[in-house]
Structures are given as C-alpha cells and as structure tokens.
Amino acid sequence: MNNVSSNSQAPRAGRPRSESARLAILDAAADLALAESRVPTVDAVAARAGVSRTTIYKWWPSASAVLAEGLLERFHESIEFDDSLPVRDALTLQVGALVRLLRETPAGALLRQLLAAAASDERLANALLERWMDPRRERAAHHLARGVAQGELRADVDVELVVDALFAPVYHRLVWGHAPLDSDLAGQVCDLVWPAISAR
C-alpha cells in the first residue's frame, strides 16, 4: 500500500524533520482533539509531544494544520483498500469508511469545526486540502484509473468530477446537517454514479 500520509506532504523550509518527532506531534494533536472534541492549542500539542512550539511552527502553519494531518495519520486505514477488490467495491468501501468515521467518532465534529474555520483562513483551507482531502481523492482517483485501464469504466471519464460526486454528499450532510450520514449512504451514492461512468 502507498503511505500517502507519510510521503505526500513536503515539510516546510528548515531542517529535515525527525520522523519520531513528527509522529509524536501528530499523535498528540489527534489524542488531544479526540479527547476534547476541539482543536488543541500549539502549546498543548507541544507539551504532550515533548517538543518546542518552534519545532511545530517550522513544519506546520497552525495547530489546525497539525490536526488535519494528525487525523489522516490516525485514520489512514479509511482510505486504503486493496487493488484486488473490484473497483466499485473499493470506491463504495472508501466512501463508507468516511461516513462511519464522521458519524461514529469525534472526527466528524472536529472536521466540521475545521471546515468552518477554513472559510476565513486560507492557510487552513490549503492545509485541509493537502493533508485531508487530497490523499483521499488520490486513492479514489487511483481506483477509477484502474477501472478505466481494465475497461470497466468509460475511457472518457472525468476522474476529478467523479471523485467530487462520490464525496460531496458526505461533506454536504456533515456541514449542513440537513440529512443524516446513513449507513447505506455510500451504496446509494455509488448506485447513482456508477451508471454514468460504467463502460457496460
């Protein structure tokens, strides 16, 4: 499996970061946030991880950015599904894992807070895209490309648009709360999308 969370993020300028320090900081941010259902302060993360504030600010622009990456690291299994699975199954499982994560763990409330704050904080918006959204999108795009290569999906499929269509209902319901994050939402979304992209 590809370790998206470890390899896809380039560190900020400065000395190469210690992997052990990085993991300690990400664990601290996730632990504090999940326990308290709110974004922790940089001071709290630094104290729990046993590092300085300066160390954190060398590598991340804010506590929210640390948390975005920390949540991905903590729940990374929710984006990794083996290529031996049929493409439709892999996509349904990935969307379903996100639904369960947001519905059944404190990560849902935390991500809602981060998305709300990102509306007025460009750095946080970029951090969420790079450290939470993009790794998930990349894995879904990988499975879609696999489907095209295998002749299961149309060759002219707009992969980026399909990824939007797969995940948008989940985030829309999370943010607005107009409808529940039902256990069968992933299946319903894929049932809706699949006829438009299938080569058969």
Image (spheres, rainbow, N blue to C red):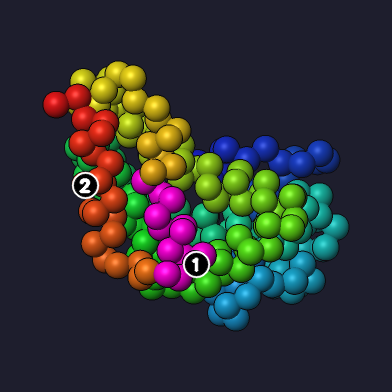
Residue positioned 28% across, 59% down in the render: 185
Left-right relation of 30 to 75: right
Q: Quadrant of residue 130?
A: top right
The N terminus, quarter of image: top left
Element on which disc 1 rests: helix
Residue positioned 74% across, 50% down in the render: 122
Q: Position of residue 2 (x, y in %)?
A: 43, 37
Q: Residues within 10 Å of mark 2 (few under 14, many from 20)?
A: few
Q: Is residue 172 magenta?
A: yes
Magenta stretch, overall SS: helix
In the foreground, 117 or 31: 117
Q: Residue furthest right?
A: 54
Q: Which residue is mark 2?
A: 191
Q: Is residue 118 visible?
A: yes
Q: Position of residue 142 (x, y in %)?
A: 38, 32
Q: Position of residue 99 (x, y in %)?
A: 37, 61
Left-right relation of 144 to 160: left
Element on which disc 2 rests: helix
- Magenta stretch, residue numbers: 166-178
In the foreground, 98 or 176: 176
Q: Earlier in the sequence, mark 1 or mark 2?
A: 1
The C terminus, quarter of image: top left
Q: Residue furthest left?
A: 200
In the foreground, 180 or 75: 180
Q: Which residue is mark 1?
A: 176
